[in-house]
């Protein structure tokens, strides 16, 4: 049985680890012996037959994502870094994998060069050398400098395959990665990675679903949605705000509750979805929702969500409200535009088979 060593790091939200878990579970179900190695805060995950290893956890110090810290906010000193590198390399040596996957690196996660560069060196020097794979989302940060793009190209010389978890008919990778022509011969689109659980039941019927994912930047959207409700044509509907802390409760006719495992069911039955534009939420929106307003998280440096939402809006699939314009009145106007526009379901379906295609491609490469 071929072994897969899959490195993933979530820093601010939980989107990276959620997508990696779907991939790990699917790879294991297809016959791989998979070890998912996580460097972020511990979470409960459904990994199926895949195994799991927790590195000493780190997180982003703040929303800028430039610096890392321990979970308690303490900075990473050299002792901590060297200990984590040593643990990672010992684990890699013990596993002797046939495939090494780095999630998002070298297109992102460059804060982890201190451990990923030694890991790549160990993989290159191992006999026989494992297949080295970069697993990357549909959109990468467009704000990087030409020097950073060149560094990415140099690092990619160590990689055999680049798996782009997107659909070029929806968003082409060249829109966000300036050096696409230099990597296209080794890059493969897998389709979007979706947890295609069945969306059964009547939960959420005719509701407005406001969700902010598992990250730490959702409060402004929740507050704006609560204030916008009375200004919209959907004021009489039930509004379900997902992202509140603690137990579910009703506030002024709105349900406020934590994230729910039946989110696909809620999306399928809802009249409208309002959310951020992270990868997993957008994939679920494209898979299940009728109409959607995306309010992307973004900064001058972090362009990924803004680009994804803008490009989907250009195609008419969703309505996009830039985060800097978020206010009750502008959100109410965006909701009205979404209700007057076409349903997502009126478009040709995008490729959502990214997990199964990834497994098939890796089996093919090893064969």
Image (tube, helix red, strand yellow):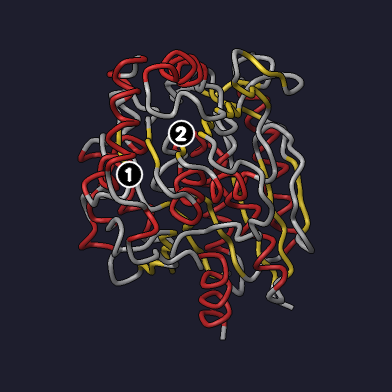
The residue that disc 2 covers is 275
Q: Quadrant of residue 27?
A: bottom right
Question: Is 247 on the left or on the right of 149, as rendered?
Answer: right
The residue that disc 1 covers is 318
Secondary structure found at label 2: strand
Q: Give the percent coordinates (x, y) of residue 137.
A: 43, 51
Seen from the viewer's position, the closer of residues 185 and 235 is 235
Seen from the viewer's position, the closer of residues 270 and 243 is 270
Question: Is 345 on the left or on the right of 303, as rendered?
Answer: right
Residue positioned 37% across, 57% down in the render: 156
Residue positioned 52% across, 63% down in the render: 124
Q: Quadrant of residue 240?
A: top right
Q: Dot 1, crowdedness within 10 Å: few (<14), some or many (≥20)?
A: many
Residue positioned 38% across, 35% down in the render: 294
Seen from the viewer's position, the closer of residues 195 and 103 is 195
Does residue 89 lie above or below 57 as drawn?
below
């Amino acid at each position: 049985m071929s072994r897969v060593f899959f490195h993933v790091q979530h820093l601010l939200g939980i989107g990276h680890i959620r997508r990696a878990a779907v991939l790990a579970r699917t790879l294991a179900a297809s016959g791989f012996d998979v070890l998912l190695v996580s460097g972020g805060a511990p979470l409960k995950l459904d990994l199926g037959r895949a195994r799991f290893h927790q590195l000493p956890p780190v997180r982003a110090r703040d929303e800028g994502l430039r610096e890392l810290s321990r979970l308690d906010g303490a900075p990473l000193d050299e002792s901590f870094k060297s200990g984590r590198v040593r643990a990672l390399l010992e684990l890699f040596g013990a596993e002797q994998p046939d495939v090494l996957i780095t999630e998002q690196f070298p297109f992102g996660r460059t804060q982890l060069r201190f451990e990923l560069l030694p890991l790549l060196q160990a993989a290159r020097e191992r006999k026989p050398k494992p297949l080295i794979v970069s697993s990357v989302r549909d959109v990468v940060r467009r704000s990087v400098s030409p020097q950073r793009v060149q560094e990415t190209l140099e690092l990619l010389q160590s990689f055999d395959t680049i798996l782009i978890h997107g659909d070029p008919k929806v968003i082409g990778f060249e829109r966000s990665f300036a050096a696409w022509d230099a990597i296209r011969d080794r890059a493969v689109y897998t389709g979007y990675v979706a947890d295609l659980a069945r969306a059964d039941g009547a939960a959420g019927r005719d509701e407005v679903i406001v969700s902010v994912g598992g990250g730490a930047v959702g409060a402004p959207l929740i507050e704006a949605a609560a204030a916008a409700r009375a200004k919209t044509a959907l004021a009489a509907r039930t509004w379900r705000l997902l992202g509140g802390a603690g137990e579910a409760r009703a506030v002024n006719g709105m349900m406020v509750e934590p994230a729910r495992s039946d989110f696909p069911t809620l999306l399928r039955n809802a009249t409208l979805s309002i959310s951020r534009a992270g990868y997993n939420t957008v994939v679920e929106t494209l898979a299940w929702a009728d109409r959607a307003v995306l309010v992307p998280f973004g900064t001058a440096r972090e362009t990924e969500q803004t680009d994804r939402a803008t490009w989907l809006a250009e195609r008419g699939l969703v309505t996009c409200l830039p985060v800097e314009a978020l206010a009750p009145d502008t959100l109410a106007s965006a909701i009205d535009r979404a209700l007057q526009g076409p349903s997502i379901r009126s478009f040709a379906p995008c490729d959502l088979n990214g997990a199964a295609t990834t497994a098939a491609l890796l089996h093919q490469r090893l064969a």
